[in-house]
């Protein structure tokens, strides 16, 4: 009888969990030939235990494979597909099926630190010249369903552009045309200079901006980080279109850039499109190393600046660590500790440690005629301060996009895994060592005050 049942098709009526029959009751089974009522105990004896064991083992094995595949996919997704074109351009690609759009970031690993002395603002104008008109930027929103921005600082120029997934190839083609066929002429340069000058005329009347530029110059002198990143009204007048042409030939080259792409796209298609459209981007004849003469020791005497109609503002600065310094993670935690300590005496103070390619800088800005509390640097770091600051830093680091982490690794000659390990393993002794190091650095100060009428 059992073997007869074993070979018959069986349909079991499944009860919902809350309606399961109590033990000892019966279930109705429908066989191919008839319907019978059997007890739960009979069900147990009519099933093949060997077959049940085999099925259970198979399910467990499949579940294990599925979990392993999921974990492998997660780990692989953190590492992009990496390619390098013949012109030296590096390509990073992440395929994210859940992404609503395509994002492309192109980073040129040279920024305003390479401005010629006396002509500060060249690299800012060069980046503005990539999309020099409102119409050239509006195209990304109106035709591609995305947007575009160009970010410039001392260390790099970066284009961030987005589009709908189906416009991916057109997006790459548009960016490639803007970079490899950039038009630099007198009229365009003149228009860009005028727009930047108008912006600086406003900024140079703001006490916070004036104090920030002055305290940097006091600390670094003519060193690149002591000069205004966007230039000044005066320095812009010395720049002509030939300076932009020269800067483009030296820095805006394929072998000095990295392209990062993320979104729902096929990486093979992305590689082919990059080769087709960005493969024509010229390679530079000679790379320009980011090496400069180190600045002299600064003058620590307080500098006062009179500014018409300005409210009082105080700024302080001292040398920090470079982005690729082994103590970068510790300095980032120290920054949070200093913020908490200084804010106790100056609630509106702004504390920022900017780690750059070359020496970093720690700056403190505060409204009024404030005084920098030196005990913020000399007091020993407590476990509670360290734990709180480390938690904040780790949380911020976890939110940083993979694209930016990999681009930073190329710019600052670090590794993504190395940065992650440094933040995970940093100890209170490391932070204390950096604090002791900062405490020995000269501190410069600038005070902006209203001009006497």
Image (spheres, rainbow, N blue to C red):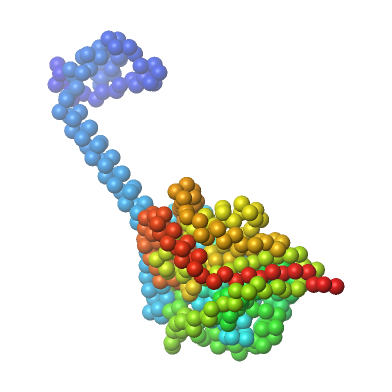
The residue located at (30%, 21%) in the rendering is 12
Residue 50 in the figure: left or right of residue 336: left
Give the quadrant of residue 78. bottom left
Q: Please give the name of the residue rendered at 51% of the width and 56% of the height, measured from the top-left corner.
A: 379
Image coords of residue 252 (percent x, y): 51, 80
Q: Position of residue 238 (x, y in %)?
A: 67, 88
Which residue occupies 14% across, 16% down? 1
Which of these two is toward me, 117 or 3? 117
In this picture, residue 295 sits left or right of residue 209: left
What number of labels is visible? 0
Q: Residue furthest right?
A: 453
Residue at 21% x, 14% y is 42
Q: Say which of 326 and 233 sits in front.
A: 326
Q: Position of residue 366 (x, y in %)?
A: 66, 61
Q: Is residue 80 left or right of residue 247?
A: left
Residue extending farthest to the top is 24
Please name whichever residue, 20 or 252, is drawn nearer the observer in this view of the structure. 252
Q: Is residue 355 visible?
A: no
Q: What percent of the width, then of the height, locates residue 279?
A: 44, 78
The image shows residue 3, relative to residue 270, as above or below, that is above
Screen quadrant of the C terminus: bottom right
In the image, residue 347 sits, relative to residue 130, either above or below, namely above
User: Vertical placement of 350 versus 64: above or below?
Assistant: below
Residue 19, visible in the rendered structure: yes
- The residue most toward the bottom is 242
């Amino acid at each position: 009888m059992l073997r007869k049942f074993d070979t018959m098709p069986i349909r079991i009526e499944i009860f919902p969990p809350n309606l399961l029959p109590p033990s000892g009751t019966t279930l109705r089974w429908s066989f191919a030939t008839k319907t019978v009522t059997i007890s739960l105990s009979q069900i147990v004896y009519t099933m093949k235990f060997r077959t049940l064991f085999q099925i259970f083992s198979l399910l467990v094995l499949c579940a294990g494979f599925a979990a392993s595949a999921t974990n492998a996919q997660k780990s692989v997704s953190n590492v992009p597909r990496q390619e390098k074109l013949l012109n030296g351009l590096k390509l990073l690609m992440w395929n994210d099926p859940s992404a609503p759009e395509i994002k492309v970031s192109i980073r040129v690993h040279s920024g305003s630190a390479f401005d010629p002395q006396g002509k500060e603002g060249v690299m800012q104008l060069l980046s503005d010249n990539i999309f020099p008109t409102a119409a050239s930027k509006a195209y990304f929103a109106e035709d591609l369903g995305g947007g575009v921005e160009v970010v410039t600082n001392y260390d790099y120029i970066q284009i961030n552009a987005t589009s709908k997934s189906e416009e991916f190839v057109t997006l790459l083609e548009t960016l490639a045309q803007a970079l490899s066929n950039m038009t630099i002429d007198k009229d365009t340069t003149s228009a860009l200079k005028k727009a930047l000058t108008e912006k600086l005329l406003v900024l140079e009347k703001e006490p916070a901006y004036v104090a920030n530029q002055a305290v940097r110059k006091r600390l670094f002198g003519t060193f690149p980080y002591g000069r205004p990143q966007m230039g000044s009204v005066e320095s812009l007048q010395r720049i002509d279109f030939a300076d932009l042409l020269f800067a483009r030939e030296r820095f805006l080259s394929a072998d000095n850039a990295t392209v990062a792409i993320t979104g729902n796209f096929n990486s093979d298609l992305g590689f082919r499109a990059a080769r087709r459209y960005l493969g024509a981007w010229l390679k530079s004849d000679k790379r320009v190393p980011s090496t400069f003469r180190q600045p002299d020791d600064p003058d620590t005497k307080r500098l006062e600046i009179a500014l018409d109609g300005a409210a009082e503002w105080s700024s302080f600065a001292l040398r920090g660590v470079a982005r690729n310094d082994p103590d970068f993670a510790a300095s980032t935690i120290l920054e949070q500790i200093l913020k908490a300590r200084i804010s106790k005496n100056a609630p509106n103070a702004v504390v920022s440690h900017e780690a750059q390619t070359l020496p970093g800088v720690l700056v403190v800005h505060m409204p009024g005629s404030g005084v920098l509390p030196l005990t913020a640097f000399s007091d020993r770091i407590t476990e509670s301060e360290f734990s709180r600051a480390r938690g904040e830093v780790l949380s911020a680091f976890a939110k940083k996009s993979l694209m930016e982490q990999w681009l930073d690794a190329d710019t600052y000659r670090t590794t993504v895994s190395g940065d992650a390990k440094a933040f995970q393993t940093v100890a209170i002794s490391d932070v204390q060592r950096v604090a002791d190091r900062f405490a020995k650095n000269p501190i410069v100060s600038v005070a902006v005050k209203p001009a006497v009428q």
